[in-house]
Image: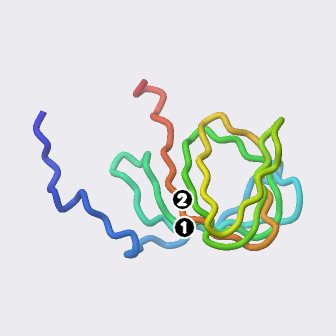
Amino acid sequence: MTDEIDPAMRLHRLDVVTTEPIVDAPPPERVVEGDPTFRTQVHYESPDGRLVTGLWEATPGAWRVAYDEWEWFRMRSGRCVLTPDGGEPVALGPGDALVLEPGFTGVWAVLEPCAKDFVVMLPPPPDAE
């Protein structure tokens, strides 16, 4: 198989953002407390759409999460608590980094407005397995 990708396309400056921010919120049935909202700025998306990096910001509140993707993140600012189902709460603040694997479920609580850099790897489409 011949690699037909231009080597220059393998280098991506992540400080050059060309997409509009996405403003969203958790589904109402997942909200545990408050009225949280999110703002996501995608900095890079792979050609197949499975690898996404960017900046995510959230306002105070708490909601249930269920991951089918893999995520690495580092907190830039703010305070939050991630509580896995059946586990102990994990307090997070500026500089803290975490990996969440597929199958993680729990509650994400934002105590003060927060921001995190993230890398997400989405699962392959069902027909690709």
Where 16 falls versus 105 (above or below)?
A: below
Q: Residues within 10 Å of mark 1 (few under 14, many from 20)?
A: some
Mark 2 or 1, nearer chain start? 1
Q: Is residue 127 left or right of residue 90?
A: left
Where 1 falls versus 114 (above or below)?
A: above
The three-letter amino acid code for the residue at tag 1 is Leu
Task: Tell me which corner region of the image, top left, top right, bottom left or bottom right, holds residue 97.
Answer: bottom right
Kindly state the secondary structure of the residue where label 2 is placed: strand
- Which residue is more in the foreground, 18 or 15? 15
Q: Residues within 10 Å of mark 2 (few under 14, many from 20)?
A: many
For label 1, the residue is: 55
Kindly state the secondary structure of the residue where label 1 is placed: strand
Task: Tell me which corner region of the image, top left, top right, bottom left or bottom right, holds residue 74.
Answer: bottom right
- Spot occupied by residue 82 in the image (x, y as percentages of width and height): 76, 52
| Residue at (56% x, 41% y) in the render | 69
- Spot occupied by residue 23 in the image (x, y as percentages of width and height): 63, 68
| Residue at (79% x, 47% y) in the render | 83
Q: CA distance from mark 2 to mark 1?
A: 6 Å
Outermost left residue: 2
Task: Tell me which corner region of the image, top left, top right, bottom left or bottom right, holds residue 91.
Answer: bottom right
- Which residue is more in the foreground, 93 or 15? 93
- Spot occupied by residue 42 in the image (x, y as percentages of width and height): 48, 64
Which image quarter holds the N terminus?
A: top left
| Residue at (16% x, 56% y) in the render | 7
- Which residue is more in the foreground, 5 or 83? 83
* CB-based contact (under 8 Å), mark 2 and mark 1: yes
Which image quarter holds the C terminus?
A: top left
For label 2, the residue is: 118
Where 123 falls versus 90 (above or below)?
A: above
- Spot occupied by residue 10 in the image (x, y as percentages of width and height): 24, 57
